[in-house]
Structures are given as C-alpha cells and as structure tokens.
Amino acid sequence: MVDALVVLAPLAALMALATAGLLKWAADARGPLRAGTVVFLLMMMVGMLGGAAIYFAHPSATALVEGFWVASALMSVSVVTVFLAFLQEARSSPALGGDGRRPELRSRRPFVLTVIGLVLANELLMGWVFSAAAGTVLRATGGGALGGVDLLAAIVASPWFLFTMAIEMAVTTVLLRDRISAPMFRVLLAQSAIMFLSPTALASANWVALSVYAGSAAMIGLIIYLMEFIYRHRQLDPAFSHYVVALLAIFSAMMAGQFLWLYYGGWPVVFAASIVAEMALFFFAVLRYELFGTGVDRPWQLDPAWALQLLAFVFIAEVFMGALLDLQAEPGVYVGAFFTLPLTGPWTTVLYNATYNGFWFLAGVTASTWFLAMMGVEMGALLYYKFRESRDFENRVRILFTLGSYAAFAVFFPSIYLAAVFPNAPNPVTVPVLGWSMGIGSAQLAASVFGVVVLTYVVTGGLTVAFGRRVICSVFCTAPLMYQGTTIDAMKSFNRTEWPAKKYLGSRFSTVYSVTTGLVLASLALASVASYLDSIGVWSVSILSADPTVFLLSLYFGILWYVMFVTIPYTGNYNCVTMGWCYTGAIAQAFQKVGFFKLKVRDKNVCKACTTLDCAKSCPVGLVDMPGHFRTKGEFRSTKCCGVGNCVGACPYGNLYISDIRHWIRDKIGTRAVPPARARLPMLAPRPGAAGAGNLSTARAAPAVAAPALSPPVGATERAHA
Ligand code: SF4
Ligand code: SF4
C-alpha cells in the first residue's frame, strides 16, 4: 500500500499539473487548432485512464489487451479533432487561397462544455483507477441508477479525486492570475483550499477532525472576506456578484453534504454532487467568466433580491457548518439527536414528524454553542471592522461590551467548557437569569424559577430605566452583534427603500406594529400560564413535545429570528425592533418609556440649518423623524430607539449625544452634564459687521441661518454611513 502510494501520489500530482496546464491553454484558445489540441490531449488522458479502468475492473491478460485497445481507439478518434482544426487553419493560408486571417472559434460554448466534460471524466476515471491501484476497488453498492449514483459519489469523495482536483484548481488559478481580478484570485484559491480540506477524503479520525475544523475556518474566513469586500465596494462587478451568490449556494449544499455524511456514517451523495457543481463553477469562471454577467458595475444596495440570496446561502451554509461542528466536537450530545421521528405511516404522521424533525433540527443547531461561536466569529469580525471605523468613544465602548457579552453569554456559558472552569456551577439552561432567553423559555415556568425570572427583570429592567433599552438590544442580546457589523449595518438602506420595511419607518407605532407586539406578548403570557399550570399538574400541555415557553423561545429566537435576519433586504435591519415581533424587546421598550434615555443636541440651531440629516440616514432602526424633534425640542425620545449610537458618530457637527441617568445625576449635583463636542460646531454665516461672527453664539443670535453656509468638516459626510 505504502509502495503504491509512493508511485501513485507523484503520478496524480503530475496529472493535476498537466490538466492545469491544459486548462490554461483552453482559457487562451481562440482558434480551432489550439482548441483541437487541448481536446485531443484531454481525450488521450481519458483513453489512458479508461484503458486502465478496464484492466482494474477485471485484472487479467485479456483485460489488459482490451484496455490497451480501448485506449488506442480513443486516442485515434481524438486525433481527428486536431486534424480537422489543422485543415481549417491551413485553408486560411494565402498559399492555399485563404485570406491569411487565422480562423477563430465560431462559438466558445461547445468547446468549453467539451473541456469541462473531459476534465470531469478524467477526474472520475482517475479517482476510480488510482483507488483500485492503491488496493480499494470501488463498486456500485446496489443495482440500477441508485447504485451508479452511489459509485460516482464514492469516487468523488475519494482522495484521488478531491486532492487532485484541489491541486488542479489552485495551479490553474496561479497560472491564470494575470487575467483574473485580485478578489476573484483570492476567492478561487480559497475554494481550492476548502476542496482540499474535505473530510471524506481520508478514512482517518484525525483527518476528519482536522478537515472539519480547518475547512470550517477557511470557509468562515472566506465569508468574512466576501462580506467585508461587499461592504467596501457598494458597486459590484456583475460577474463577480453572480459568481459569489452561486458559490455560496454550492457551499451551502457542500456543508449540508458534509453534515449528512458525518451524521449518517458515510453517505456522500449530497457532498459529491456539490463538489461536482463547485468544480463546474470553477471551470466556467476560468474559461468563460463573461457567462456570469457583463456590463457596468451596479450598486447592490439597490438589489434586494441579490442581497437576500447572499444572506440566505450564507445562513444555510452556517446552519450545516454549525451542525457539523456540533457533531465533531460533541458527538456524545449530537449523534442521533437530530431527525428522531421516522417519516413513515399515514401522510398526517409523516407531515407531523417532518415538521417536528425540521423544527428541532433548526432550533437545536441555532441554539448550539458551536453554531453561535461560528456566527460570533463571522459577525463579530464585521462588528470589529465597524468598531475600527467608529469615531464616537462611547459607541466604541458599547461595541466592546457587545462583543464581550456575546462571547460570555451566548458562547461560553452554554458551552461544555463552563463545567471545566466552574465544576460546581448549575447547568445554565436551568438558570433563566443566566440563560440567554432573558428569563422565560429556558426551563419550565415552575415556582422554583420564579425568583430568578423576577430577578432577571429587576436587573435588566433597572439597567434599561437607567441606560435605555440599548442595555438589551445593543449589548446583551445576540442580535446586535449580528445586526451591527459593517455589511449588515449597510443593509439598513433597505429600511428606507423596500416594502414592507419602509412601512415601519419612524418612531410612530402603526396599527400593524401594535397588533404584532400585542400578539407576541399575548403568546408569551399564554405560554407562561400554560407552563406554570403544567408544572403544578393542573394542565398537561406541550407543543412539539416541549414545554410551551421552551417551544416559544425556540420558535422566536431559534427560527423566526434567523428567517427575519435573512429577509433584511425586504424587512429591514433590526426588524425585531421596527416590526415589534420580539417579546424581550417589547418588554425592554416598556422600561425605556419610563427611563432616562434620550438623544439630545447641543444646539437646536445647528440642526435647523443642517442639510445632511446624517443622523437619520445612519439609524439602523429607521427613526427618520429624529431631526424634526431636534429642531423643535432639542431632543428625541422614542421607545423604538435601541441606542446603537450610529447617529452620534454620523452627525458631521458632533452636535448629538446620548443622555441617560449619568447626565441626569450630573445635572442634579451641578457638575457638567453636557459632554464636550467631539468636533467643532460649524461656522455659521456671519452678518456683515457683527461682532463675534463665526462662532456658535452668533448662531444663537441669528437662528435664521442660511443652510449653504453650514458645511460639514471635510470628509465627515463621507465617513457617515449611507
Ligand atoms: S428587539 Fe429583541 S431580538 Fe431585537 S435586539 Fe432587542 S432583544 Fe434582541
Ligand atoms: S446630522 Fe447632526 S446637525 Fe444634522 S439634524 Fe442630525 S443631529 Fe442635527
């Protein structure tokens, strides 16, 4: 076996290099002669491998001869393509009466399809032949088409296919680097690395563990890169934007395939199909990139359908990656834990069981440590980028709190490592004040947990009264980490442009908002009462075999939250707040109504003359009515405001600040309550001859300021988020 590997591995590497060289040729081929030569050489490789396959299928002297003849026949046929191409080129020569112009391929599509087909055939044959030569003859496990599919999947999932293909892709990318854009070059290399790190390739527990962790890390890195790239480039090359969405769609299938392979102990069909799709996508990108789109760059913020696809495929990939990591890191908890009900029996039973399986799979994975850790790394990286560009000190501190809270309460406390660090601590799920459900929903609402539930609301309610609902909605909840990163924050533009998001603009409570919040709070009250009655034995009730409050928490935060997150391009950023469908937010909102939190401006006149209205544009909750309140009252108070503080950093005049209990206390004890301005307030148009013209006191003396005289500091508007 080791001897065979010593021969086979370099041979496979050589074939990968040769194929990469041929792909470069194919990418450069414009005339029939070069195209015919590429096809000829690829068919030669198919012939050689086909002949070898015949021999290894039934090793014997006869098979050796048959294999030789098949190889020779295929090579002979392939020579025809070169011969015909040569004739075509020769006919164009002036010596033979031609016009001297080198003929061009009439259409590249058949050529590209032929090349991709031949490369795929080569890889499949190579996967089978090299496996057989190494001692494993892959055979169809059953009869008919299904057996054939299983055989093809086993070949694709083998090291000889995956490693060779990954090397081929990487070398081709490097060979073609001069004709590929820099971001595309990075994406194609990352794709090659991710393909190389396929857990199905080697039947070794160490390899499976390494490839699951390293492959997930590579994919997370790629997603972070793509998201940040999209944020930095609001106008995207159409081909690149289509390629990215197609790649993410394939990655979601690939992660589903890896999960199913691991969960069902070696079923590689979905994974293999995604690998073939990824391979085809790669070859189309290097051979016919223009297929993905042409034309001028377009602003993705005007294309909600594209943004929806982007978020949906990232989310699907993440769910399955989270499930894969759960299985790999904690097999004792997760092996056999999903899809527990059989899909057999009457259709009503099948429907119920499918709903049950799907619901608890999704809710279980999205609440699991590894999913949340992975989301935390991805979205946390985007939030870190946001932190770097945030100029407001208070907001920077808040972002650090957000990152810390997520790491502590969403990842560390529910993780297996908590028990290692605090061996005597109770399971966090049974302690509502620690559980990230904010009280209700992590356990049955029995008399024994009333104390901690009440304590939860006393603590969070007190903090909300003092500092506003930002304590929950911008720090403690897992949502702010995901909503506020650069790219997702940029999607707040959809709040103002898309239906239904724009229906919820402003601080007004529309009828539909009030109905939604009312229904959500009623469902919480009903579930809590039912849960309590169940705990005292009065009413035995469960939903999908779970306590009503646990079901409700899973429904709202394990499923609905992510569905709404994916639909941000239509429902808007922070739609839990704008639409009022989150019961925790609705409760926090009630505390904020009686609290100290508000937004204040230093000078109303500055707002009166302001033409940028950057504060309103930067608001992720779409509170577009705030400048009007600043102009009339000098302050703005809305229970929808979740205190993200983008507006404070966006105001080009540094005119805005958040006021909470700290300012109230300072005001009472007579110390300075209004924080100093970060930036100099604007110069206002001086009246000719007026003393002190050009400072703020002039603005107060002359409120009817001409708007054009108020100009933001250079670069301030650009720095403000669109
Ligand atoms: S409204 Fe609910 S989900 Fe949204 S940020 Fe606030 S607590 Fe979190
Ligand atoms: S951007 Fe600043 S100056 Fe303009 S309305 Fe908003 S708070 Fe006032």
Image (cartoon, helix red, strand yellow):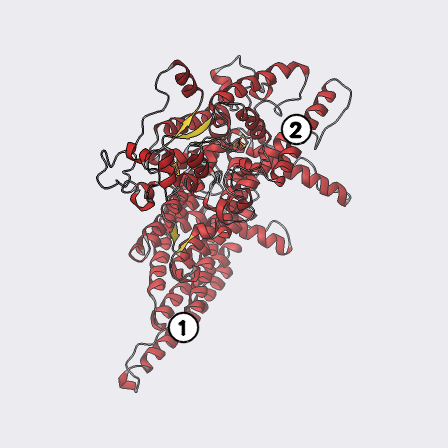
The answer to whether any part of residue 137 appears in the image is no
Q: Earlier in the sequence, mark 1 or mark 2?
A: 1
Which residue carries the number 1 mark? 81
Closest to the observer, 300 or 117: 300
The three-letter code of the residue at mark 2 reads Leu
- Measuring 60% from the left and 30% from the top, which residue is drawn there? 583
Closest to the observer, 508 or 146: 508
Of the numbered discs in the image, which one, if any, rests on residue 524?
2
Quarter of the image for the N terminus: give it: top left
Q: In this view, does 21 lie to the left or right of 531?
A: left
> Which circle, 1 or 2, is nearer the viewer?
2
Q: Residues within 10 Å of mark 2 (few under 14, many from 20)?
A: many
Q: Which quadrant contains ligand 2?
A: top left
Label 2 residue SS: helix
Q: Is residue 576 left or right of residue 176?
A: right
Q: In this view, does 407 lie to the left or right of 525?
A: left
